[in-house]
Amino acid sequence: MLACFLDIDGILVWAGDPLGFFLLLKKLSRYAKKRLKNYMENSIGLLSKDMNNQILKTLVGSHAHGLNTPTSDFDFRGVFIMPTEDFFRLPKVKIKTTDWVEDDVDNVSWELGHFLDLATHCNPSVLEVFLSPRVDKQTKDYDDGDRLRDLFPFVWNSKGVMESFIGYGLNQRKKYLEGKDGRPAKFAAAYIRSLYNGLELLKTGTFTVKIADLPIGATVRRFKAGEASVGEVIQTCHDLEIQVRKAYEDNPDKKTEIEPINDFLIEMRRKHFDV
């Protein structure tokens, strides 16, 4: 069964199960109901239109990291461009993110402006999209996806990488210690991977998505297989966090270069004004 979640200006809309959506609607406030009603009446048609403007789709998750097992889900992340004229319509609608889950496939796409904003704040999941293998078909806008990825050296900054990658790692540690979803080993692997990627980025200006190919890959595999003690996971990642902070101290001055980012965004807004 297909489930679709839309983040509409801060409200999460579930548009995959009519019965579930109806039960949710009954519990909402009058204000929220009005906003959802306006969305359903005026904006649902934008979704398919926007996804026709997808300029990038990448493989992420365990298959991209080289850590997949026979039961691993497929995870895809992409970027689409909402027609510029739709930003000026009433009622005001902000479609920032789309998220589909179907069987064992998870698809997430960000609207270009939202994606670039997250990138300049060094969101680890977003930065990974710049470096992950492309899986989308050749279209008239395919080259725009490559040009978007070429912005990678401009979007990140040293302080943002240190804070975001350590913060992401600590969130994975919390889930690991809580045994979230009954899969603590999954979060142990994400914990060490995020810290190592942050360390790579601060030291080299990029990072390796397929972490299994690196010397640390064997350790990440053991963590994911649940073969490491809690003490080893925490100590190993604590040591990596110290290295990330040291790498930032050695390279504190890398700044986000906003001008080429804005030049590309404005060009895309003009190109997609009424697509």
Image (tube, helix red, strand yellow):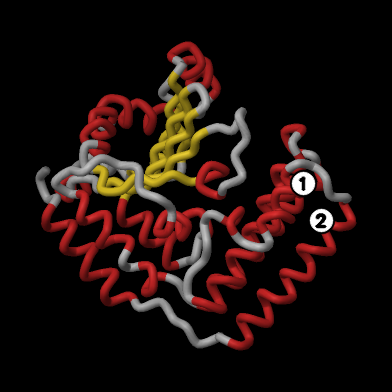
Horizontal relation, residue 164 to residue 136: left or right: right
Q: Which of 219 and 47 lies nearest the eye of the viewer?
A: 219
Report, in whole angstroms, how far the alpha carbon at label 1 lies from the one at label 2: 10 Å
Q: Which of 224 and 262 lies nearest the eye of the viewer?
A: 224
Q: In what quadrant of the picture does the C terminus appear? A: top left
The residue at 80%/42% (across/down) is: 226
Per the rendering, the mark at residue 233 is 2
Residue 123 to residue 35: above or below: below
Of the residues shown, which amino acid type is indicated by label 2?
Val
State the image quarter where residue 161 is shown: bottom right
Residue 111 to residue 249: above or below: above
Residue 268's spot in the image, x, y percent?
A: 18, 58
Horizontal relation, residue 241 to residue 101: left or right: right
Q: Secondary structure at mark 2?
A: helix
- Crowd class of label 1 (few under 14; some 14 to 19; many from 20; radius 10 Å): many
Residue 273 to residue 195: above or below: above
The residue at 55%/32% (across/down) is: 73
Per the rendering, the mark at residue 21 is none
Note whether residue 31 is visible.
no
Horizontal relation, residue 88 to residue 200: left or right: left
Query: Pointer 1 and pointer 2: residues touching (CB < 8 Å)?
Result: yes
Q: Which of 10 and 137 lies nearest the eye of the viewer?
A: 137
Residue 256's spot in the image, x, y percent?
A: 41, 77
Residue 175's spot in the image, x, y percent?
A: 74, 46
Residue bearing the label numbered 1: 176
Residue 259's spot in the image, x, y percent?
A: 27, 77
The residue at 74%/75% (across/down) is: 242
Q: Secondary structure at mark 1?
A: helix
Task: State which tag comes first along the sequence, 1 or 2.
Answer: 1
Q: Which of 203 and 216 lies nearest the eye of the viewer?
A: 216
- Crowd class of label 2 (few under 14; some 14 to 19; many from 20; radius 10 Å): many
Note whether residue 174 is visible.
yes
